[in-house]
Image (spheres, grey):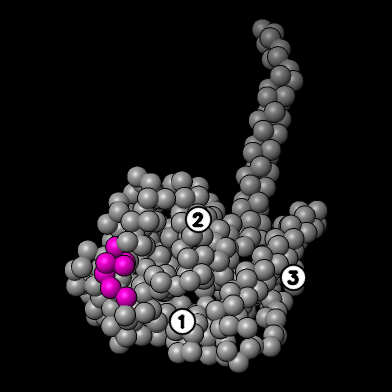
Amino acid sequence: MSGYALSIMQSLKHTILHRFNTARSLAQATVFTASLVCASSFMVSPAIARTSEGIPLDAQVPIDIVSPALKDIGIDQNLNAQLPMDAVFTDDYGKTIQFGDLFGEKPAVLVMVYYECPMLCNMVLNDLLRTMNGMTKLDAGKDFNVITVSINPREKPELAAKKKRAYLKEYGDRGNPAGWHFLTGTDENIHKVADKVGFRYRYDEARKEYIHASGIMVATTDGRLGRYFYGIDYSPKDLRLSLVEASNNQIGGFTEAVLLYCFQYDPTTGKYGWWVMNIMKGMSVVMLVGVGMFILIMIKRERSKNRMTVPARMPVVQ
């Protein structure tokens, strides 16, 4: 079996596992919420006990047997790591830029692929495009940037520009085309970014192909890694929430603020899941307000009743 087929199988495996973990987390959250409502809004269940890093204690990482061809291939989470702002690339216009030029005002989606990839990279870019089309409230180039970095130092700006035109055609007239960057660069500068991101890949000399994992990353406005999404199936909701977080809530609105209160990023799955304690805090506030209003209404009724039953004063006999 070729290294490429193994890469794709590995990516599909991660996608299926992520879906399963997310479904399991949602089911646990639903059952737990129902039990708390019936009993008490102030009880804490062991089912959602978390470590100091916010990772569920019951989250289990599956033990699998890794093919030798994929032993050194993967994506490591380097959350909050600073991207190399001094790395030099050539953009799809043929202009030499520093990586830091792409940050400062907007968060960014970072994608590590190569443009002549026979299959997996196209699947990553295609699903990113589908996800972006599903984010009706956020537009590339207007609310966030997309930075696509080729891991193949032999690829040139002409190929990057061709790839960009194809995807912009499918994205339509939304946002600003200048906000979706397709970069090429030297092996040294590519590795500067890949090493900081945790993107581990290698070139298969026999097949003349790169073996790599699949996923996308979200970076903050100052170029720090904020979120990782693995596989080839990205949720528009998850990507939207991660971009809002990465922008320090400078994009999005009230809906996103409420969703971020109820959902929390889980690094073990690369997904946003229900954060039950925040939901219960909100329910507790609603209950307290309701009880307070009920008490006020009862007091007003009691006072009104007392005024109606006060006897009239008897006339004074001279």
Pointer 2: what residue? 131
Count of numbered circles in the view: 3
Secondary structure mostly seen in the magenta stretch: helix
**Picture disc at residue 23:** none
Kind of residue at badge 3: Ala
| Point 54% across, 61% down: residue | 234
Rounded to the nearest angstrom, the CA distance separating label 2 from label 3 is: 31 Å
Q: Residue furthest left?
A: 95
Q: CA distance from mark 2 to mark 1?
A: 27 Å
Viewer can see residue 309: yes
Amino acid type at image mark 2: Thr
Q: Is residue 61 above or below residue 42?
A: below
Query: Looking at the image, is mark 3 or mark 1 nearer the viewer?
Result: 1
Which image quarter holds the N terminus? bottom right
The spot of residue 201 in percent (x, y) is 47, 84
Q: Position of residue 126 (x, y in %)?
A: 48, 60
Seen from the viewer's position, the closer of residues 150 and 220 is 150
| Residue named by callout 1 | 209
Q: Are marks 2 and 1 in contact (CB under 8 Å)?
A: no
Kind of element beneath mark 3 = helix
Q: Quadrant of the C terminus?
A: top right
Left or right: where 243 falls relative to 300 = left
Observer-nearest residue: 60 or 67? 67
Residues drawn in magenta: 155-161
Residue located beneath label 3 in the image: 47
- The three-letter code of the residue at mark 1 reads Glu
Q: Secondary structure at mark 1?
A: strand
**Magenta span includes 297:** no
Q: Residue at x 37, y 56 (%)?
A: 166
